[in-house]
Image (cartoon, rainbow, N blue to C red):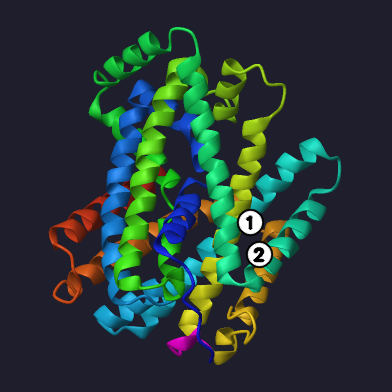
């Protein structure tokens, strides 16, 4: 089996992770969160970021000690020596990535079909072929591509913030939003945070490229914290900006709430935010391709699946067999699977994995650099979210 090459610095790593987190989530979810929490949506994003932050601390502590692909499976092997559980965790991650990509690919096709009248399958196949080629080319090139899109995503959020700030009476509206948000009860904010939590998912993909990060002992934790802190700050500023322009009740009624804010605050006759949203979707897809292929590579290295999955191209130093296989399965899934049901189950799967990671961190607390209070709180919060999600099914 070949080895992956360490070519990513901590800043590139952090921006790569920030792009994974931002994705298309904030561009859509902010309206739904406002529908649950009203102006308290500001604090819903803060609470969700806090919950995700505890998970990031456990992930980064373990990934610093074990900077390997299929990271979650490795954590289970190192902490519990349970190969069956490690394989289950790894395959659950791959399944989550495939389903997530299927949802994103269909969303990409829906957006593009509004601009060009062609069958959606053409957009799905074209997007996957291009992104697969980028992923196979090399992790450095893929990360740089993802960073470029991340900068575009952040620029889109910054445009929303600046345009909102320049709108008439912004200061008085913003003060009213912040003041009234302090009067919102704990339950609406909590329910809003359950939705907002999914706008932070994506950080977990970062540990599966830790094997390709320079000096991982220092850079993995720095990059992950950079990504999470930046996301929390951005989301709270965006929430204040959006709610100051469009009242929460109205914002909840838009399918593309930030696009609506842009239309209200600018005279530009061009769907800029919609276009940036398209790029955000592309970033999400390529992140899943990278994550899934590295998980299969790592599972193969640990001899949990056949060595064929661990073959690395001698030229590009990427797991070529796993990348091609993952893109093929993603294509089949995007064109045929009932993705809505699978996507909701995938969310529960990810929360289960986060809980296992916290448990692994507690088990290895003497070997990793972390206060055990943090994974304990993180584990309790994740189990709480799982129970709420299960309760919603009944």
Relative to the observer, which residue lies in front, 228 or 90? 228
| Residues marked 1 and 2 touching at CB (< 8 Å) | yes
The residue beneath circle 2 is 330
Relative to the observer, which residue lies in front, 18 or 285? 18
Q: Is residue 304 magenta?
A: yes
Q: From the viewer's perspective, is residue 259 above or below residue 18?
A: above
User: Percent from the top left, x then y, of residue 159?
Assistant: 53, 29
Q: How many labels were placed on the picture? A: 2
Q: From the viewer's perspective, is residue 200 above or below residue 352?
A: above
- Residue 17 in sight from this viewpoint: yes
User: Percent from the top left, x then y, of residue 267?
Assistant: 66, 16
- Which residue is most to the right? 118
The crowd level at tag 2 (other Cα within 10 Å; few <14, some 14-19, many 20+) is many
The residue beneath circle 1 is 102
Q: Secondary structure at mark 1?
A: helix
Q: Is residue 167 magenta?
A: no
Q: From the viewer's perspective, is residue 387 above or below residue 46?
A: below
Residue located at (68% from left, 49% from top): 106
Which quarter of the picture shows residue 121? bottom right
Residue located at (55% from left, 62% from top): 143
Q: Main secondary structure of the magenta part?
A: loop
For marks 1 and 2, the one nearer the N-term is: 1
Quadrant of the image containing the C terminus:
top left
Q: What's the magenta region?
A: 300-305
Q: Secondary structure at mark 2?
A: helix
Q: From the viewer's perspective, is residue 61 above or below residue 266?
A: below
Q: Report the side of 335 relative to 135 (left or right).
A: right
User: Percent from the top left, x then y, of residue 296?
Assistant: 52, 78
Relative to the observer, which residue lies in front, 265 or 251? 265
Q: Report the side of 264 relative to 121 (left or right).
A: left
- Residue 28 in sight from this viewpoint: no
Residue located at (59% from left, 64% from top): 142
């Amino acid at each position: 089996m070949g080895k992956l090459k360490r070519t990513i610095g901590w800043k590139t790593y952090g921006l790569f992770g920030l792009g994974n987190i931002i994705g298309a989530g904030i561009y859509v979810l902010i309206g739904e969160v406002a529908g649950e929490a009203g102006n308290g949506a500001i604090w819903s994003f803060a609470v969700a970021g806090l919950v995700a932050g505890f998970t990031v601390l456990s992930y980064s502590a373990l990934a610093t000690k074990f900077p390997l692909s299929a990271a979650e499976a490795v954590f289970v092997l190192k902490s519990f020596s349970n190969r069956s559980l490690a394989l289950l965790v790894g395959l659950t991650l791959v399944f989550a990535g495939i389903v997530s990509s299927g949802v994103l690919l269909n969303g990409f096709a829906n957006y593009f079909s509004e601009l060009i009248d062609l069958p959606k399958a053409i957009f799905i196949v074209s997007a996957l072929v291009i992104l697969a080629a980028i992923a196979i080319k090399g992790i450095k090139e893929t990360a740089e591509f993802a960073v470029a899109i991340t900068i575009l995503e952040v620029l889109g959020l910054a445009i929303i913030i600046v345009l909102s700030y320049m709108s008439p009476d912004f200061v008085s509206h913003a003060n009213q939003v912040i003041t009234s948000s302090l009067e919102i009860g704990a339950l609406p904010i909590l329910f809003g945070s359950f939705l907002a939590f999914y706008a932070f998912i994506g950080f977990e993909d970062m540990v599966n490229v830790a094997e390709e990060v320079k000096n991982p002992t220092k850079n993995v934790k720095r990059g992950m914290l950079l990504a999470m802190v930046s996301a929390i700050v951005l989301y709270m500023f965006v929430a204040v900006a959006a709610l100051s322009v469009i009242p929460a009740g109205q914002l909840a009624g838009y399918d593309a709430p930030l696009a609506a804010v842009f239309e209200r605050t600018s005279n530009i006759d061009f769907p800029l935010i919609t276009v940036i949203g398209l790029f955000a979707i592309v970033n999400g897809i390529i992140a899943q391709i990278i994550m899934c292929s590295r998980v299969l590579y790592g599972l193969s290295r640990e001899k949990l699946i056949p060595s064929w999955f661990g073959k690395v191209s001698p030229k590009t130093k990427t797991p070529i067999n796993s990348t091609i296989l993952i893109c093929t399965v993603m294509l089949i899934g995007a064109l045929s699977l009932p993705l809505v049901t699978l996507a909701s189950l995938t969310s529960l799967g990810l929360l289960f994995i986060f809980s296992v990671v916290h448990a692994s961190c507690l088990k290895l607390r003497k070997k990793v650099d972390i206060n055990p209070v943090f994974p304990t709180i993180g584990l309790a919060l994740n189990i709480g979210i799982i129970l709420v999600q299960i309760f919603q099914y009944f």
